[in-house]
Image: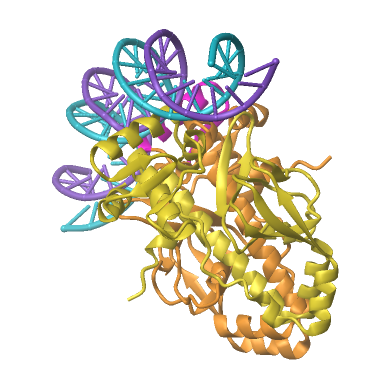
Chain colours: A yellow, B orange, C cyan, D purple
Amino acid sequence: MIDSNRLTRSSCTISDVELDYRRILTPEELELIDSKTVEVKYRKGEVVFKQGSFANNICIIHEGLLKTYIEGNDNRLVLQVFSPVKMVGLSALLENSHVRHYSAQVYVESRLSLIEIGVIRQLMASNAAFASKVVSLVAEQFIITSGRFYCLTMKQTYGRLADVLLCLGNRIYRTPRFPLQLSRKDFAELSGMTIESVSRIFTKFKHDGLISLDNDYLELLDIPKLEMISSKG
Amino acid sequence: MIDSNRLTRSSCTISDVELDYRRILTPEELELIDSKTVEVKYRKGEVVFKQGSFANNICIIHEGLLKTYIEGNDNRLVLQVFSPVKMVGLSALLENSHVRHYSAQVYVESRLSLIEIGVIRQLMASNAAFASKVVSLVAEQFIITSGRFYCLTMKQTYGRLADVLLCLGNRIYRTPRFPLQLSRKDFAELSGMTIESVSRIFTKFKHDGLISLDNDYLELLDIPKLEMISSKG
DNA sequence: CAAAATATTTGATCTAAATCAAATATATTA
DNA sequence: TAATATATTTGATTTAGATCAAATATTTTG
C-alpha cells in the first residue's frame, strides 16, 4: 500500500519527481536551452532572487542548499527547501505575471544554473511532453507545500521540529549523521517557532537520546521515536 | 504599480487566470473532451472526492461553492475555496501518482462537470498550448495557496477572519452584502481558529460597525478598516 | 591574542487563543 | 406545537509558546 502521508502531512519539501527533462528534448531544443543557460556560484547567504522582482529565469540547483520564502512586513515564511538536483522558481510560469511571488536564498555555498524563462516558455509551447513534465513538477510543488502548510498549522512545536530533522536526515543529507549547516535561526524559521523554542526542544531531544550534537555534526539517534513525535503533532 | 500583495499575503483563494481553455482546443479536441465529460449536481455538504482515493477526473465548478482540504487525524486544513467557473483537482496531474492528496466538498448545492483525467493527460501530451495553460493554472494555485499559508501562519485571529470576510465580499460573492451560507464552523475552519473565537470576533466586528448580520445576510460595512486589520495581522 | 560581535542557552513572565462550561438561540423532528 | 437536537454566544480557566532578560558560548575582527 502506498503512503501518501509524507506528502500530505509533513513539512519536508524535497521532491520525488525526477528532473529528467533533458531526455524529452530534441537535440536542437537541447542546444537552444543550453545556449540560454548560465552557471552561477552563490556564497553562503546570498539571495538568488527577490519577491517582487521580474522573473527572468528558472534555476536548477546542482550543488548546495537553498530555500524559497515569502517576505512579510517583519517576518518570513519558508515555502520550500531545495537540494540538488531540483528546479526552482517554476511558479513564475504563471501567465500574465512576470513577477516573483517569493524570494530565494542559499543556505551554503551553492552552484546553480539559470535558464532564461523565455526559452522555457518557448519549449513549453512547442513541446507538449516538456510542458507535461513542467505540469508534473509544479503540481508536486503544490502538493508538497500544502503538506508543509498542514504541518505548520496543525502540529505543535515538537512535531514540527521533529519533522524538519527527519527531512534533513532522510531526504536532504540522506544519512542520520550530517553536518550542521543551519543555525538555530534557520531551524526556527523552518519549523515556524522562535529561536528560544528551538533551543529548548533541542536540549530536550538531546536529553531524551533522540539526537546528538557534537562538533558541528547532528545525528538522529532514534528515528522511530522522532517519527512518532512528528505524527502525533 | 502592480500589487502582488493579495496573492502573496492573503488567505483568499480565488483565481485570476481565465478558464478559457476551450479557445485553445481544436474542434476535434473539443468533441473528444466533451465526450468524456459528465455533469453532476451535488447537494449541500456532499463530498466530491476523497483524499487517498484514485483521481479519475478533473472538476469544473459551474454553480455553487466548494472547498478542498487536507484531512488529518482529527482536523482539517482548508486549502482552497472555489467558486464558478474554476477547475478543481488539477494537482492530480502529478505523474506517477494517481491518488488525491486532498478532499473536496461542496458548501452549498453545486453543479460541476467532471472530465476524465485520461483525456486531460492526452490533450496535454498532444496540445502544447493546452499544457501551458494547465501549467499556468497549477502555478497560480501554488502561489495562491502559499499566500493563504502565509496568512494562516503569520497573522493573528482578527487579521485572518478579516481576510476571509474580504475574500467573500470582494471575490466570491462580488458584493459587500451577501447571503450567509457558511456556518461558524466553516468560518473557523477557513480562518484556522475555533468556533468560539470566530463568534467572539464577529461580536466585536459588529460592535465596531465593521460588519452587520441580519436575517441570513452578512454585510461588510467598513471595508477599508477590515483591510487594515487584515494587513496589520 | 584580546576585544567586540554574534549565537545559543536558560529562566521568568506574559499573552493570544484554546479549552472547558453553561446559557441562549435556532433548526429539526415527532 | 412541543420536544429534541444542533448551532451560537458568552464567561471562566488553562496553556503552549512567545516575549523579555540575562548568562554563557562561539565566532569574528583589529
Q: Is residue A131 above or below residue B164?
A: below
Q: Is residue A215 above or below residue A11?
A: above
Q: Position of residue A70 (x, y in %)?
A: 62, 42
Residue at the spot x=44%, y=34% of the render? Answer: A193
Please state which of residues B133 and A87 is positioned toward the viewer in this rendering: A87
Q: Is residue A140 left or right of residue A152?
A: right
Residue at the spot x=58%, y=49% of the render? Answer: B146
Q: Position of residue A199 (x, y in %)?
A: 39, 31
Q: Quadrant of residue C4?
A: top right
Q: Is residue A224 above or below residue A194?
A: below
Q: Position of residue A109 (x, y in %)?
A: 64, 47
**Can I make out residue B138 in this image?**
yes
| Quadrant of the drawing holding the C terminus of chain B | top right
Q: Is residue A64 left or right of residue B53?
A: right
| Quadrant of the drawing holding the N terminus of chain B | top right
Please state which of residues C23 and C9 is positioned toward the viewer in this rendering: C9
- In magenta stretch: residue A154: no
- In magenta stretch: residue B213: yes
Residue at the spot x=56%, y=80% of the render? Answer: B117
**Can I make out residue B22 in this image?**
no
Q: Position of residue B158 (x, y in %)?
A: 50, 30
Residue at the spot x=37%, y=40% of the render? Answer: A214
Please state which of residues A192 and B222 is positioned toward the viewer in this rendering: A192
Tell me how many marks there are: 0
Residues rendered magenta in the picture? B194-215
Please state which of residues B223 and B188 is positioned toward the viewer in this rendering: B188
